[in-house]
Image (spheres, grey):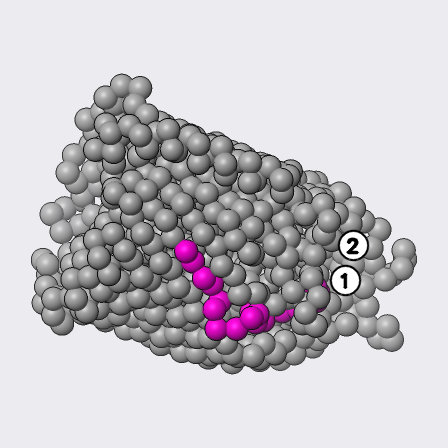
Amino acid sequence: MEHALKLGIDLQTQPSIISFSRRALPLLGAGLLCVATSVHASSALLASSERLKQLSVEELLALEVTSVSRTPESLAEAAAAIRVITRDEITRSGATSIPEALRLAPNLQVAQANASQWAISARGFNNVLANKLLVMIDGRTVYTPLYAGVFWDVQDTLLEDVDRIEIVRGPGGTLWGANAVNGVINITTRTAAQTQGLFVEADVGTELRALGGIRYGGELSPDLHYRVYAKAFDRDDTRLVDGASAADGWDSRQGGFRMDWEREATTLTLQSDLYSTRPDPDGNAPVDADGGNVLGRWQHVVSDTSDFQLQVYFDRTRRDFGNGFAEKLDTYDLDWQHRFQLSPRQQIVWGLGARRMHHEVRNLPLFQFRPPDETLDLYSVFVQDEITVIPERLRLTLGTKIEHNDYTGYEHQPSGRLSWTPSPRQTIWGAISRASRTPARIDRDFYLNLTPQIGLIAGGDFQSEDLLAYEIGWRLQPGAGLSLSLSGFYNEYDNLRSVEPGPPPLFVPLTFGNGVRGETYGIEAAATYEVTDAWRLRGGYTFFDKHLSVKPGSQDLNDASVESNDPQNQVVIQSLVDLTSALQLDAVVRYVDALPDPHVPSYVAVDLRVAWNLGRQVELSLVGQNLFAERHLEFVPSSPSAREIERSVYGRIAWRL
């Protein structure tokens, strides 16, 4: 019963998938090879192709990020613990999915639970149903009100088109709203103008049995560019601890387009994705899913000190869990943002937001959501005031966001950030923030029936979980080719989810309450070092500790476990070496400490990549993942059997024309 209570009710036991035959993938790969070969013969395209660029330390620190303040600012001056994963780092890591790319961030907990299910969180509280991390792809929030988290199996795109991934550890609720409690992940793809020409890739290997991708970008007029893409893959099963196949392999296919019109101070963007995923026909993974989205964005620069943006999107997802339970979610979202200068030393950013989510489920006799169909509305307003106290030296940023949701009414999430730049090569910052994790349907509307007359779990009066966070950080460039960053945090949580027993003698139904509180603290260190012009190291270390307790009056049956399992220590090191102008040797080494409950042993994972560039367009690479062991355990969800992640090898050929 203990694992069932740790909700534990793992609705996404195996991920959803698409209808794509395993036999079709090699055929797709062969077709892509033929197309690419014919295009490769064109010398005109060879001359115009773009090459991946390894950014220097100075260029990395000068990168503009938007996730901290919703306006462009240099990474070196951002008053937050932020890590940017660049397109070059993603390519040279050998990652083939967004979760694999996120492993490059030393201060994220990223664990693979089975062939398609991931547990990803920042600063603790990790689970396959993690609910304290906000994730966006090109400004579109990938969020399910089912449990206030992310279904990672359907978050995908052509990684070649990803420009950067910004990862902010710590609360982001002041700008991004509820559920940006422990961090924000902002995935940004390149514009259509940056992805002109043809790109083709084909991968074949052991665990990644096949992957094919194609993208073409063109110009309709000097101001209007477009791209279209398609991607499909076939992934093998993981293994049970006894070595038997877990029969959880799956296939996926996805396609989409993007158009950007830009003239003078105005930019219009229209983009869309469609996807479908499905388990292997020979496996027992029950979930299949499909969906799509369309997003429009209007950006206009009024002057050097003023601009605004209007964004709207529609997102539809459907998941069938294969056991009779299914869900469908339609999300309508509108977001307005305006930046202007109030005085020479004061910049204001403010905005309005509205979101409607229509969620439908097909219930089972055993567990249900009541009502089965629910429409949830969310309205918000935020304002942020950035004050230059001392020009080029001291900045104070104050802000708050006020949201209204259908479960708890109004929520406010204020913050204050101070950034001091004592010299051009260092920044010291501190922040105090409040954030909230508002109730999801699983907190309020979920029922588990013991008998037709008696409920084992009944929806209760669950309120928002609250966080008060204290952060401090130091970013330093002591010399050319070296950058360091250090941050520390202390978090106070209240009203965390508990499982409360009913009245005696049966002590049922159980209800979800807010009977747990606690504290977490940690240190996050990161560095980038250019050993030589041809060799760069990047990585970091994270220490994390958590102490939770049951509040007076609560009888939490989970004994303050709060459905999370986190390592205390993590280390990630990425090495990028240009052996010659055409030959690259890259490695990623990760150490993850043991997880306490359920126990998962610590492990070291090593990934290696060798790439050979034939001219400026064609790249051949061989990638080995998890090379230190035949297989290892990374995470044990509460309901499925433990799955081990195997050593894998794949070969890749890519054309950029």
Q: Residues within 10 Å of mark 2 (few under 14, many from 20)?
A: some
Q: Is residue 22 above or below residue 607?
A: above
Helix, strand or loop for disc 2: strand
Question: What's the distance in space between the residues labelled 2 and 1, CA to CA?
Answer: 9 Å
- Vertical side of 567 occupied by 27: above or below: above
Q: Are marks 2 and 1 in contact (CB under 8 Å)?
A: yes
Whether residue 93 appears in magenta in the rendering, the answer is no
434 left or right of 361?
Answer: left
Q: Is 14 positioned to the left or the right of 198 in the image?
A: right
Residue range corresponding to the magenta coloring: 622-642
The foreground one among 446 and 415 is: 446
Q: Position of residue 10 (x, y in %)?
A: 68, 59
Q: Which residue is mark 1?
A: 457
Q: Residue at image x 25%, y 42%?
A: 616
Seen from the viewer's position, the closer of residues 243 and 9 is 243
Residue drawn at (28%, 73%) of the image: 486
Q: Which residue is mark 2?
A: 367
